[in-house]
Amino acid sequence: MTLSALAEPLDSAAVRSVLLDYAPHASHPIPVLSDAQLDRLLEGRVVKLRTPSEGRAPDGAMAMVITDHSRVDLWLGSIDSEHFGTDSSLISHHLPLRGEELFRWYGYVALPAPVTDRHFLIQTTINPTLPQQRAGMWERSWGLEAGLVETMRPVVAAGEIAGLSLEAFDAAISVPVNLGAWIFLDLPDGRTVFGYHCASSLGGEIPDALVTRYVFWGLDRLVERVLESARQMPTHYTIDHAPLIGGDGVPIPRH
């Protein structure tokens, strides 16, 4: 799927250099692109690949694309939940931040019977040292927060999450692994490498390979949504919009 026509060819060595420059500072390891994958990226197409297993996490799924949108607009488009939207099958509830998190939220996913529903508690943080060490690079990553039941059961019992009963909460299985990152890297010609990767295990009777396949299936749509949202940021993220934090930890100036 060609997302945009590149105005002029990029130098493959320059793109590879940017990716290799980012990799040692990444929150999670990413694979080195093959020549064929790099060629596809240079054609303006979405590259999908596997990320290596990490600790308890299985192999993950990753998408990467070169786009004309700026790093800032891509970042804004991917964190503005009102504009970017959420999965309709997901019940979510944001929690107060306790430290350096960018987001802290609970998610509940109802799965088709007889599979047991799943839930999780996520912390998202920026990579604060990346923009200090490498100009033009932003990243945020997420992982599970411990103490899901202790944190969320009182919230659910108090009726603070619409559509979620205490009975359903108690019956759900806590996801054992969920981690990943959003990547935004400036290229020498003014374009941006946008990347996203996720590794998840749902535990129980659901094979990890099936979960990874499902993530792969949704990557094209996720990239399309981020690019479309980024396109609208210059007219959406204006003075009337609540300020949002950038990958350097500083509020992004509004248009």
Image (tube, rainbow, N blue to C red):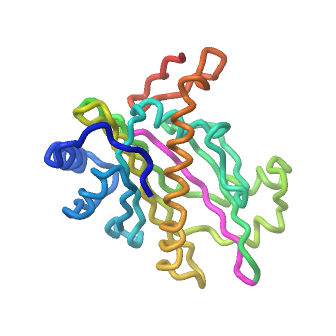
Magenta-colored segment: predominant secondary structure: strand
Q: Residue at x 23, y 64 (%)?
A: 36
Instruction: Look at the image and give the residue range highlighted in magenta.
Output: 114-126
Q: Quadrant of the N terminus?
A: bottom left
Up-down relation of residue 164 to residue 58 (above or below): above
Nearest the camera: 107 or 35? 35
Q: Residue at x 66, y 17 (%)?
A: 240
Quarter of the figure with residue 54: bottom left
Say left or right for 73 vs 64. Answer: right
- Where does residue 195 sit, x and y in percent of width and height? 39, 50
Up-down relation of residue 28 to residue 206 (above or below): above
* Magenta run includes residue 88: no
- Where does residue 140 sit, x and y in percent of width and height? 42, 43
Say left or right for 136 vs 160. Answer: left
Q: Quadrant of the C terminus?
A: top right
Q: How many marks?
A: 0
Residue 129 visible in the displayed image: no
